[in-house]
Image: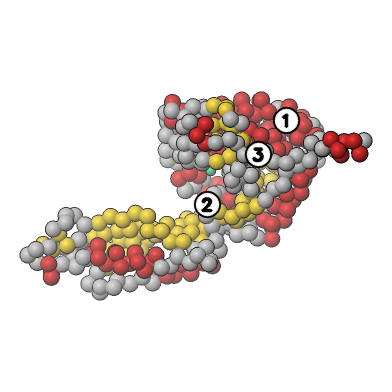
Amino acid sequence: MNSRRQGRPAIPARRCCTSSSLQAETHAIISPVDPILAHVNAQQAAIIALIRRLVECESPSDDVRAVDHFVDLVAAEAAPIGTVQTFPGGNFGKHLLCEFALPGPARRKGEILALAHSDTVWPLGTLARMPFRECDGRLWGPGVLDMKSGIAFFLFAVRTLRELDIPVRSRVRLLVNSDEEVGSDSSRTLTQETARRAKAVLVLEPGTGLDGKLKTARKGVGGYTITVRGRASHAGVDFAEGVSAIVELARQIERVSSFTNWKQGVTVNPGLISGGSRSNVVAAEARAVVDIRAPRLRDAERLDRKFRRLRPFDRRCKIEIEGGLNRPPMERSVGVVQLFRKAQQLARELGVALEESMTGGGSDGNLTAALGIATLDGLGGVGEGAHAVNESILVSRIADRTALLAKLVAAL
Ligand SMILES: [Zn+2]
């Protein structure tokens, strides 16, 4: 809550355009500031104002009206520079698809899809204790990093291309879904269908760490529910008649935990257990919910076979396994690497040394990468504290991130 406790913001990225005085003396020509970056720099106050409006419009995943209201706000920003379309989100808010009117040939070559989500993990009313604010070189507030700043960056990137009349070869669309934070069930098909025609997907999720590394690999995410059924009996009178589901589940938990393989990056976390009725009753039923992460599809498939092969240690128990992979891994494919190299080269023109990272967390980028589409993730805000009270972005990185998106769209 108290921003001062979070320490000072990180040192801003190196800017090659700030040539040293020595260089300025020896070379008469100082390297010119990138025109896109210069334009975005001049828009910084307007970008911050938009981020503020987005953050101050709360949009928790489970509140349809709030999310719809937020989507209307984004649609109103996009409408003057393109066309907007919404799709029903079922139990969640509506999904938004924007197509932008950009300079360039009438016949477009391929399509670029930017991916974002409108929902946050923060319940309505969070703003009362975590208001939007700008201090210590950062913007603070619920959803500012994950991922409202990313949406603002992309809208301003598109505006910049229009205002500078920079030709764009591709068709450019932005898909904002409403349920990413709760598993993307209602938007999954729409995301996959929309992405299918794209030559590149740019995911506006936050970068990694305070240097804003891009994400070129994400682990696949899944889960299993293990249900064990035994036989209840009186723990004192008929102990021998009982078959404890809890004891059996404890042994199964030991077994599935051993599936964790650090070398392969595979993790298995029994994160939730329940079972039994009273301490003096031998438990008839027990259940564990297990989270799994795997960097490669083949590891996830191997893991799945292991779960399916689980058998009771005590034959008198019955065991039931449900679940599987929810988001496939975003593997660091050749297409992903090429896209990253392109971004790295464009960032260099902005004076930023861009690095890549791999994360255990999933995003909708997992879905598009699994279709074989070159996907680059983590192009949104640079900051820290996603889903936490210190959620914030660095003001010093607003301009270069926005400019990078504009340059990527123009270059692809
Ligand atoms: Zn997110």
**Label annotation for residue 11:** 3
Q: Is residue 175 visible?
A: no
- Ligand 1 is within 8 Å of the C-beta of the residue at disc 3: no
**Label annotation for residue 223:** none
> 74 above or below 308?
above
Disc number lying in front (3 or 2):
3
Q: Secondary structure at mark 3?
A: loop
**Residue 15 vs residue 92, the one in the foreground:** 15
Q: Amino acid at mark 1?
A: Asn
Q: Amino acid at mark 3?
A: Ile
Q: Amino acid at mark 2?
A: Gly
Separation of residues labelled 3 and 1 (CA atoms):
18 Å
The image position of residue 378, as x and y in percent, is 61, 46
> 259 above or below 179?
below
Is 122 on the left or on the right of 192, as rendered? left
Q: Residues within 10 Å of mark 3 (few under 14, many from 20)?
A: few
The image position of residue 182, as x and y in percent, is 45, 45
The residue depicted at 60 percent of the width and 59 percent of the height is 331
**Residue 145 vs residue 110, the one in the foreground:** 145
> 293 above or below 158?
below
Please tell me in which quadrant of the rendered image residue 18 appears.
top right
The image position of residue 199, as x and y in percent, is 69, 51
The residue depicted at 52 percent of the width and 36 percent of the height is 6
- What residue did someone put label 1 on? 41
- What residue did someone put label 2 on? 362
Q: Answer with mark 3 or mark 1, whichever residue precedes in sequence.
A: 3
